[in-house]
Amino acid sequence: MEKKIPYKIYLKEDEIPKQWYNVRADMKNKPAPLLNPATHQPMTFEELRPVFCDELVKQELDDDTAYIDIPKEIYNFYKMYRPSPLVRAYCLEEKLQTPAKIYYKFEGNNTSGSHKLNSAIAQAYYAKKQGLKGVTTETGAGQWGTALSMACSYFDLDCKVFMVKVSYEQKPFRREVMRTYGASVTPSPSNTTKVGRQILERYPGTTGSLGCAISEAVEVATETEGYRYVLGSVLNQVLLHQSVIGLEAKAALDKYNINPDIIIGCAGGGSNLGGLISPFMGEKLRGEKNYDIVAVEPASCPSFTRGKFAYDFCDTGMVCPLAKMYTLGSGFIPSANHAGGLRFHGMSSTLSQLYHDGYMRAVSVEQTSVFAAAQQFARIEGILPAPESSHAIRVAIDEALKCKETGEEKTILFGLTGTGYFDMVAYQKFNDGVMSDYIPTDEELQKSFDSLPKV
Ligand SMILES: *Cc1c(COP(=O)(O)O)cnc(C)c1O
């Protein structure tokens, strides 16, 4: 007899995982190393130390240790908002009249409104433990900056955030949340850094991009005593911290012997997707189980589906190490019409390698269809989703509708990464019928591919 599955599967507090899982340990083809932009040699621990905290550099370079203990201080913070619920979307299934079973892991139950807090608290902890004064970072849509502000205030660290200008202007309330937690927030590109001034000269009137903001944050971190730079996505260390999502999801599913057929997540820099899929991907890599794993990206910023697998800069100012990843070129600046996050030109090198090796697939979706899914989900399941998360909702609904046609009873798991309360300007555009679907042309992409570094 199948046990009746509740609407929400909660783990107990002491079932929050005690260790993170490092999927690289099970990869035969490891993600390519970061390269020094000047010498094109792999970045060493010593070279990365001026930029990142020591412990985080170790995690970044560790391709072999499968499980890494979560320090007690981080675990205690996790207990304030975790475990996050795994929800059976009974109402959505009913509405769609699908035989598919739909589950989502909801990461929006904290003030930052997203999964980003899982890594922010870890990064702030290691900075504090090293005796640093503060950290610098960039933020796009604002969730990462908010999460980091919360984490820094908890550990009494200074926090300097460079916020992509278009979001700074569109989301004044995000900015105020960060300031409430004690962070300073500067719109990027700004004239407070050398690289910001250069970018402003080269692209006058630009509304900014994550790549620009990263360059500014790195410059300030490396030139200010007692500061390091932290990043909210893309890096191996961030995927490691986010594995808490997948480990919890798997533990909850295992309680009821539920085996997902399809696992879906939105992909900006790849951290929530990497975290959600990691224990499942581990099983797939070890040949124990098979899953259909799907990355969903915006058609306006299609790194996986139209990008090149190549070494590239992570930032527009070309000051960061080179990463081998699916990229649109570091000069690519997505259209300002594009409302959600997911604006980064590149992608996690771990996920890029897994995608390249055929362990997962990717689809791109257009903005208006994403918001249609967001609206439908809000009305049926109650939660107002973040635009980023809604990319995953779109594809989860599409897969459930396919099941309706074929009669297959597939089990679908997707990551609901956050809430959309600060994205009401985008929702307003959608509600007013003035939202557009901007898709870059091949010529535009070629232009930014032309500037890929020759490695
Ligand atoms: C940042 C963010 C994303 C995308 O980032 P990833 O690193 O790809 O996970 C998705 N959803 C929400 C709510 C976010 O804040």
Image (cartoon, rainbow, N blue to C red):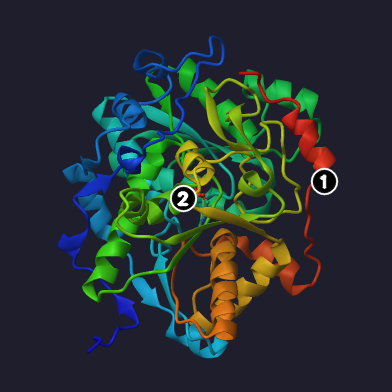
Q: Residue at x 66, y 30 (%)?
A: 190
**Split into 4 quadrants, where in the image is the C terminus?**
top right
Q: Name the residue: 81% across, 43% down.
A: 442
At label 1, the amino acid type is Thr
Residue 204: x and y, percent?
81, 31
Q: Image point 38% across, 16% down: which residue?
A: 44
Give whichever of discs 2 and 1 has the lower sequence position.
Answer: 2
Give, as a three-letter code, the residue at label 2.
Tyr
Does the rendering let one see residue 27? yes
Residue 250 picture quarter: bottom left
Q: Position of residue 332 (x, y in %)?
A: 72, 36
Q: Is mark 1 within 8 Å of ligand 1?
A: no
Name the disc covering residue 117, or none: none
Q: Which residue is mark 2?
A: 359
Q: Quadrant of residue 385?
A: bottom right
Q: Vertically, is 219 above or below 56?
A: above
Q: With 374 as the anchor, is 13 left or right in this view? A: left
What is the spatial separation of the Cα atoms under label 2 and label 1, in whole angstroms? 28 Å
